[in-house]
Amino acid sequence: MLRLLGGAVVIWGLICLLGILLTHVIDSTPLHKADLGANEWLARHRTTFWNDATAFGTGMAQTLTVVVVTAVAVVVLRLVTRRWYDGIVLVVSIAGELVIFLAVTVIIPQRRPHVQRLDPAPTTSSYPSGHTAAAIALYGCLAILILWLAAGRPAAKAIAALLFCIPIFVAFSRVYRGMHYPSDVIAGALLGIAWLTLVVKTLLPQRPIKHRSGRPARWSARRYAPARR
């Protein structure tokens, strides 16, 4: 627990430092013009298809979606593995990311791109992208749990690969819809990746935890079952 708490403070500090550089130093340099230029280019090339697609993409990381997907995933993990531990790991990933994100927004002022926005602007700061960070904490954690529990199975790898792609699409959607600068989603990605890495390194051992009966998780039971003599 202390490792997670200390790591959260370090991540918060680094993301805040990057935000201060972006809002007080880089905002007056050509780098900011390039940052805004990406938003302006996407705004000029919007189409009905991508408007609808990115609306779905941003919806995949909205608060309500994250809560519902997390709740369903926790129940499914409990039914499949017959323990709560895996679901707790997912909840820690989501909750920790949210706390760090909100703590950063207290320090860094709001700074939305000066382009037409396709979504209502939330009250929290544009920096970092909370949708991007939440997508990594949720879908990235689910992908890692699937690989952890069903290691070596092709279907697990395919599902995990799909889950890993979701945060990328969410990040693109937020920039496309004029809600964040590219630097905002990069910072959100750094926050999500750093926190998820810390959670995984701290809470997930190299092999799935065994049940009280001594058997490992159902998905990986064959792999770790003792050989017959």
Image (cartoon, rainbow, N blue to C red):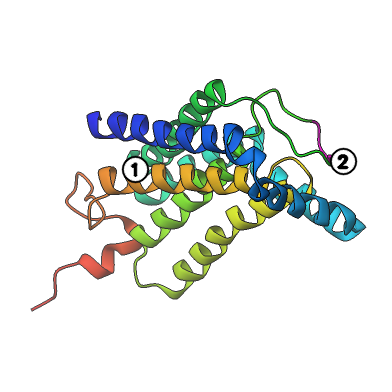
Classify residue 73 as left or right of residue 214: right
Can residue 91 be found in the magenta stretch?
Answer: no
How many residues crowd around disc 1 within 10 Å: few (fewer than 14), some, or many (20 or more)? many
On screen, 70 above or below 53? Answer: above
Q: Residue at the spot x=68%, y=44% of the render?
A: 181
Res 184 seen here: yes
Amino acid beneath label 2: Gln
Classify residue 48 as left or right of residue 117: right
Quarter in which the N terminus is drawn: top left
State which region is magenta: 116-120
Q: Position of residue 80 (x, y in %)?
A: 41, 51
Q: Which residue sits furthest right? A: 48
How many residues crowd around disc 2 within 10 Å: few (fewer than 14), some, or many (20 or more)? few
On screen, 12 above or below 80? Answer: above
Of mark 1 and mark 2, the one earlier in the sequence is 2
Q: Which residue sits furthest bottom? A: 229
User: Disc 2 designates what residue?
Assistant: 116
Quarter in which the C terminus is drawn: bottom left
Disc 2 on helix, strand or loop? loop
Q: Residue at the spot x=28%, y=43% of the render?
A: 203
Disc 1 on helix, strand or loop? helix
Q: Position of residue 168 (x, y in %)?
A: 61, 57
Q: Position of residue 119 (x, y in %)?
A: 81, 37
Can residue 117 be found in the magenta stretch?
Answer: yes
User: Disc 1 designates what residue?
Assistant: 199
User: Decide: marks 1, 2 in contact (CB < 8 A)?
Assistant: no
Q: Residue at the spot x=40%, y=40% of the render?
A: 87
